[in-house]
Structures are given as structure tokens and as C-alpha cells.
Image (spheres, rainbow, N blue to C red):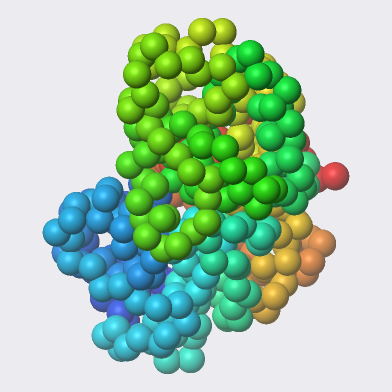
């Protein structure tokens, strides 16, 4: 738990900064919410006002309502909110994602939100930020999780797709962030093919196009005549579409799933996908360690995923004061399945702890 009376406090509504009169990614409606990004487990409806990075506005309004009271802010600008100085810094997770840095008195805290350190052509790159205290995610907080470059994985996906011209290739991925990254990564390989989209993916494309993100051309599956042949086409769909009525349109498709969880033995087979591609929008083990070290934080709190493992490693190996931040965070994940359509947070531990190696 967080120390009582500190700059950031853990409350029934989430992380709260009394000096700013604001909650960070609150779990319930609050008067003022500082939002790290627009995934549904971080941006919830009903709050009085929202503060978030300007490039996340399109997705936030799409999901929370066009009429929300939104204060859009640029990366890096210091804002005076109440008695605190607040700034948002790129997290490299999805479009508009941010780490939130809050200073008041002689304390500076950094709340990471979800982040990744790998290059991603669909969003701004991660920025290292110093702080006295760091609250970091640990979704993939085990040494078994180490990512390969996105372009290598995209090349594997392209080869899988092109090797089956007689079949429709349906690639399941999270509708916000992962789908757009795949379209951008495939374009960087030099492809120019039109990709078909499930409706859940289509609804989130406009904010990316409006921000000038270069991606392959796309069209909703629903716009195609029922008689149009789909052999050789690539289709992106959310995990919820797998084994749904929507799938009946496709005759003998090949299926793949894109997620960091595909690094876990048996995950692909257990969920019925023909192929699994390991590509995550969260930091891997090395990325988590690099972030902690570069923050120079004297105290680290770890949330989500393998918080206990990462905190113990930081204490015993790195000599950094670190503790898991559990308890109230269980409410944040309530009701999410292993493979949610928004992100990978809920999949932690699907094959049990792997341990330090």
C-alpha cells in the first residue's frame, strides 16, 4: 500500500493526488480525472472533467462521448493544477498514451500507465522521465517475456498471409492500438494491399487517420457484397469475434492471434488459433528494468501482472526499494477476460508464474 499522507494516495476510486484534486485513471466517476490513455480499463465514463494528451482526444470522445469536458494538453508542458505541477510524457503504448508526472512540495511522482519501449510507427516513442517515486505497470513482469522487433513480427505475419492465397487470413488483435500498429508496421514493409476490418476495428480508425498515421488502406468487411470472394484477403478482427456468428461469412479461413501472451506455451492452442504472433504494446522484462533504472526513483510501486515478482527482483538484485501495489487494483481488472479487446492487462499469469530465470 502507499504511505498515508503522501503525494499520491490509493483510494476506493483509484490513485488520488490531493494537491491536484485529481485522480489518475480513476475506477469510478470523479470530479477531475487525469487519463494516461484511452483503453477502457484506464478511461471510464462519468467523470466531471478529463485531462489527457491532445492526440488521444478522438478515441476518448469516441468511447466516452463527444460531449465530455476534455482538457487536451501537449506532451511535456508543465501545468499548474491546484497546488501541484503536472505534466504528461509519452508512454509509447498507443496513440496519445502518457505517463503522468506530478510534483508538489519536495516530492515528484511518476505514474507510468501502460507503456512500451519498442519502436512503433503508430504512436509517439517512449520518453524516460526522472522521479522520486515511480508507479509502474508489470503486465509482462517475468524474464520469459522479451520481445523481438515489430518489423520482424510484421514480416512473419506478411509471409503467413501471402502463403495462403486460397484462404482468407483472419488476424485477431486488440481493436485499439494493436490493429493500427499492425497496419502501420505492414505498410513499412512496403506492402500496399487493402486490409478488411471488423466493425469494432473500423470505429477506431478515424482518430489515427486524422493524426496522420501512415497505414495500409482499409475497408470494413460490411461494405463488401456478400458474393465477393475473400480468398487471399487479410482481415483484422477483435478477439471477441473469434467463433462468433460474424465468422460464418468466411469459408475455411486461416486464423492467427497477435499478443504478447503468445509467448506463453499453450496459449494459442488452448484458444483455438492456428498461429500465434508475439507482439505486445507493453514493456517486456528488459524494458521494465530499463524504465525503473532510468527513472532514478528511490521508491518503486508495481501494479498489474507480476508485480510481486518484479518488486522482489528490484529489491534483491537491483537494490531498489520496491513494493507491489495490490489490494484496490483488483477492482480495476474485475470482469475482464484473458484476451480483452482493449489490451493485454487481464491476461497476466494465464499459464501460472514462470519465476526468475
User: x%, y% of residue 55?
Assistant: 39, 66
| Depth order, front residue of 113/318 | 113
**Farthest residue, direction right:** 357
User: Would residue 31 be found to the left or right of residue 282 on screen?
Assistant: left
**Farthest residue, direction bottom:** 105
Residue appearing at x 67%, y 79% in the figure = 296
| Depth order, front residue of 26/13 | 26
Picture quadrant of residue 261: top right
Picture quadrant of residue 6: bottom left
User: x%, y% of residue 287?
Assistant: 71, 59
- In this view, 205 is above or below 23: above
Residue appearing at x 51%, y 37% in the figure = 194
User: x%, y% of residue 113?
Assistant: 49, 60
User: Would residue 244 be found to the left or right of residue 355 on screen?
Assistant: left
User: Would residue 276 be found to the left or right of residue 71 on screen?
Assistant: right
User: x%, y% of residue 136?
Assistant: 57, 62
- In this view, 104 is above or below 299: below
* Residue 240 visible, this orientation: yes
- In this view, 67 is above or below 356: below
* Residue 36 visible, this orientation: no
Total count of labels = 0
Residue appearing at x 51%, y 28% in the figure = 235
User: Would residue 1 be found to the left or right of residue 47 on screen?
Assistant: right
| Depth order, front residue of 125/142 | 125
Q: Quadrant of the C terminus?
A: top right
Residue appearing at x 53%, y 61% in the figure = 123
Amino acid at each position: 500500500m502507499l504511505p498515508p499522507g503522501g503525494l499520491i494516495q490509493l483510494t476506493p476510486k483509484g490513485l488520488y493526488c490531493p494537491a491536484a484534486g485529481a485522480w489518475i485513471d480513476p475506477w469510478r466517476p470523479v470530479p477531475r480525472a487525469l487519463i494516461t490513455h484511452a483503453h477502457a480499463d484506464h478511461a471510464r465514463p462519468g467523470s466531471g472533467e478529463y485531462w489527457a494528451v491532445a492526440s488521444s482526444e478522438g478515441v476518448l470522445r469516441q468511447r466516452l462521448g463527444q460531449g465530455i469536458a476534455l482538457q487536451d494538453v501537449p506532451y511535456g508542458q508543465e501545468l499548474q493544477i491546484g497546488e501541484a505541477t503536472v505534466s504528461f510524457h509519452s508512454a509509447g503504448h498507443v496513440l496519445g498514451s502518457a505517463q503522468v508526472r506530478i510534483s508538489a512540495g519536495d516530492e515528484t511522482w511518476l505514474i507510468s500507465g501502460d507503456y512500451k519501449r519498442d519502436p512503433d510507427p503508430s504512436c509517439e516513442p517512449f520518453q524516460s522521465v526522472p522521479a522520486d517515486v515511480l508507479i509502474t505497470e508489470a503486465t509482462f513482469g517475468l524474464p520469459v517475456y522479451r520481445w523481438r522487433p515489430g518489423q520482424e513480427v510484421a514480416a512473419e505475419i506478411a509471409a503467413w498471409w501471402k502463403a495462403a492465397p486460397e484462404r482468407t487470413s483472419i488476424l485477431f488483435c486488440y481493436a485499439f492500438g494493436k490493429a493500427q500498429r499492425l497496419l502501420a508496421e505492414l505498410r513499412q514493409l512496403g506492402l500496399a494491399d487493402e486490409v478488411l476490418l471488423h466493425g469494432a476495428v473500423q470505429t477506431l480508425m478515424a482518430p489515427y487517420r486524422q493524426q496522420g498515421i501512415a497505414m495500409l488502406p482499409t475497408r470494413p468487411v460490411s461494405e463488401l457484397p456478400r458474393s465477393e470472394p475473400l480468398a487471399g484477403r487479410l482481415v483484422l478482427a477483435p478477439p471477441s469475434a473469434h467463433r462468433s456468428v460474424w465468422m460464418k461469412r468466411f469459408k475455411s479461413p486461416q486464423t492467427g492471434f497477435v499478443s504478447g501472451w503468445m509467448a506463453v506455451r499453450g496459449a494459442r492452442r488452448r484458444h483455438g488459433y492456428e498461429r500465434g504472433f508475439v507482439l505486445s504494446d507493453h514493456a517486456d522484462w528488459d524494458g521494465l528494468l530499463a524504465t525503473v533504472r532510468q527513472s532514478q526513483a528511490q521508491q518503486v510501486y508495481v501494479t498489474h501482472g507480476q508485480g510481486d515478482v518484479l518488486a522482489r527482483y528490484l529489491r534483491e538484485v537491483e537494490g531498489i526499494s520496491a513494493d507491489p501495489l495490490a489490494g484496490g487494483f483488483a477492482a480495476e481488472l474485475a470482469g475482464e477476460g484473458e484476451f480483452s479487446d482493449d489490451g493485454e492487462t487481464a491476461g497476466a499469469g494465464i499459464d501460472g508464474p514462470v519465476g526468475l530465470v
